[in-house]
Image (cartoon, rainbow, N blue to C red):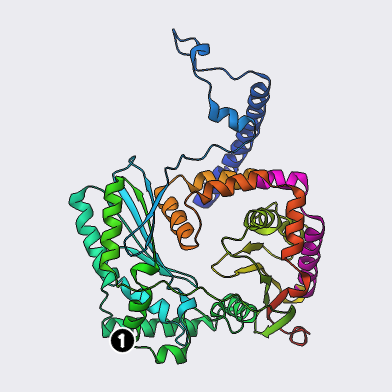
Amino acid sequence: MSAHRVQPMSPARWLGALAFLLLIALLFWRESGQQEAAAERAALDSAPISGPQIPGLDPADLPPLSSLQVLLDDQPLPSRELDLQNWQTDQGSLVYFMPAPELPMFDLRLVFAAGASRDGEQPGIASLTNSLIGVGAQFSNSAHRDMATASLRSLSDPAQRQPALELFTRVVAEPSFPEDAFERLRERTLAGLRMRQQRPSALASEAFWASLYPQHPYGSLPEGNETSLAGLSPAALADFHQQFYNASNLTIALVGDLTRAEAEAIAQQLADALPQGSAADELPAPPTVSGGHEHIAFDSQQTHILVGQHGITRHDPDYAALYVANQILGGSGFGSRLMEQIREQRGLSYSVSSQFIPMASNGPFMISMQTRSDQTAEALEVINDTLDSFIAEGPTEDELARAKRQLLGQFVLGTASNSAIVGQLAANGFYGLPPDQFQQLISDIESLTLEEIRSVLQQRLPADQRLIITLGQTPEDEA
């Protein structure tokens, strides 16, 4: 009788067995951990909060933990105290400054009314001008529809600060617009425009802005178009810079380890170096647009949906009410009304959001999402029903309380870094708001009532001006 030989397990079987044992152990550990955590939470819930157990120290002698009490009361943490100051240079440049000696650095941001809304008959010139200003310098710059910016971060010690400022000032005030750099940038922009034709989200956004702002500077694509870019030249960019990058068309924001005297000297140095000119004219109000539905055929399994209308300016008195209302409607992600109706209840989209974009002139209110092409009609019905109901009824008490907590908590983070504060100060100055607008907005939000929000919604979002843009397959294509 032959002995039965046990075959050794292969490496794959050993690994499988080991993985199985680890899984069993993990499940036991997780279950016991959850039970222990539940027991700890129950004990903490029933036990008073005590001070640290340090030999010889009576916890009663410790000061109260005010920040912990704020959390226990479900209130946001207090925001950072801001010492905000403002003045004007000799040329009329508005300067907003906040000393922050905690770190040996400073943040500087220049904002010009030199965005794409100043393109005129040369779409794309603002974007190219701003892009070429940055050649050869280590700082950030950007151009938008309203504004163009240039930013610098440096150590505040004069030995490092002054060389950085001199380079920054020279590049912003006296850009050379070299021919070879201009041609490279133009070719790159043209390539980007061609790539946009393959991006349905970009095409839907472009159609939305064009339809909502016909015959208005906001209606043009900031990057321009092939025809306008072909007509540009380095000389045209230099003329645009001379006209709009001037000291009277400038807002300066400074935050960091600087004295008031040092900040004044920096601001005046910049204003003296820039071209001298006048502030840009105010932008016209956009013409009223009737609501409607515009569909753009595009070969895609998904339909991109944009729903919106004219919104508000940055200094609109209803800004706080609409800001909070949007947080509840679709600005807070999970928990917002649109997300609950579109994703959680019906599974029509992975995400949906809403936003007000306040600008120098009336910026848009916009709801955006994408869904399967055969679900487009249902998605539009849910969006419109949810929006109509929200406008008619307004938020609930619980929704308003939650939105206030969320926003006020976000504002604390908004003052946590100097770079965040310098951005806020620059925007406030550009839009003609006081330096302490941030604190005023917090106060306005805290005092808002349900009736105020409902009244503002009904006044500012009339249904007959609601514009719908869909981009995707047409119904006959889906059959």
Circle 1 Cα neighbour tier, 10 Å, few/some/many (<14 / 14–19 / ≥20): few
Name the quadrant of the C terminus.
bottom right
Specify the quadrant that holds the N terminus: top right
Front residue of 23/421: it is 421
Image point 25% across, 73% down: which residue? 174
In the displayed structure, would residue 268 be above or below residue 301?
A: above
**Is residue 351 in sight in this rendering?**
no
**Is residue 78 something that shows in the picture?**
yes
Q: Mark 1 belongs to which amino acid?
A: Ala
Residue highlighted by disc 1: 235
Residue 197 lies in quadrant:
bottom right
- Mark 1 lies on a secondary structure that is helix
Q: Quadrant of residue 473?
A: bottom right
Q: Residue at x 58, y 79 (%)?
A: 206
Seen from the viewer's position, the closer of residues 294 and 334 is: 294
Q: Position of residue 157 (x, y in %)?
A: 22, 47
